[in-house]
Image (cartoon, helix red, strand yellow):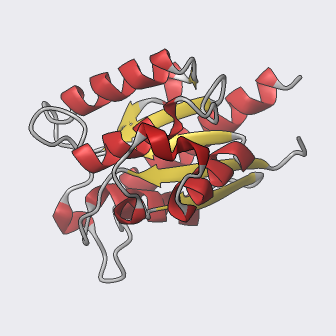
Amino acid sequence: MTDVVRVLLVSGSTRSGSTNTAALRTAIEVAPDGVDAALWERLVDLPAFVPEDEREPPAAVTDLRRRLAAADAVVFCVPEYAGNLPGSFKNALDWVVGSGELYRKPVAWINVGTPGRGEGATAALAGVLGYVDADVIGPACVRIEVRRDALAPDGAVADAAVRAGLAAQLAAVAAHVRAATR
């Protein structure tokens, strides 16, 4: 690994105007020096997981797996739906459980929900990440509330405190990756 830490930002939302996706787009804007953050927001392109398709996965699955494998770390930002992970996002995780891209991969998440919201989704995500033996970066698993009225016309988050929190979260991810590779 070079001094640049490649972080894949994964949005777990398919909704246009998602505060989860907006937070990740903003994270790219505020990424500290030495962090190359890239957004994957193509959840809608993934077909339903079918174990028999593992031998020849669809192109969208191959692309996701390639991006995960190339990243030094992954940051997830996932909404809660009915007290759990959205089905479309759980489907994406199902596609990578057996293929190994998250095995020992440094990972973290951002919960952008208001206090009292999102814990079901983050608990379920933690369960899956534990199952695949991902390297969960505890201090970088954070709540950074993003209210819909905090979005600028371009879809980014304008709030200075949110932007600072996102930059700090990426800095913590990068520090973990760098410490682990020494």
The image quadrant that residue 115 belongs to is: top left
Quadrant placement of the N terminus: top right
User: Which residue is at a point 32% across and 55% down the rendered structure image?
Assistant: 20
Most distant residue in the bottom direction: 153
Most distant residue in the left direction: 82
Q: Look at the image and tell me whether residue 164 can be seen.
A: no
The front one of 162 and 52 is: 52
Quadrant placement of the C terminus: top right
The front one of 80 and 65 is: 65
User: Which residue is at a point 67% across and 52% down the rendered structure image?
Assistant: 66
Where in the figure is residue 107, as x and y percent of width and height?
56, 32
Q: Look at the image and tell me whether residue 48 can be seen.
A: yes
From the viewer's perspective, is 115 left or right of 145?
left
User: Which residue is at a point 70% across and 46% down the rendered structure image?
Assistant: 71
Where in the figure is residue 36, as x and y percent of width and height?
71, 57
Where in the figure is residue 134, as x and y percent of width and height?
57, 23
User: Which residue is at a point 65% across and 39% down the rendered structure image?
Assistant: 73
From the viewer's perspective, is 73 left or right of 114?
right
Q: Is residue 5 above or below residue 142?
A: below
The front one of 32 and 39 is: 39
Q: Is residue 138 above or below residue 9?
A: above
Q: Is residue 126 above or below residue 107?
A: above
Where in the figure is residue 170, as x and y percent of width and height?
58, 44
Task: Count all numbered tags in the image, as a single digit.
Answer: 0
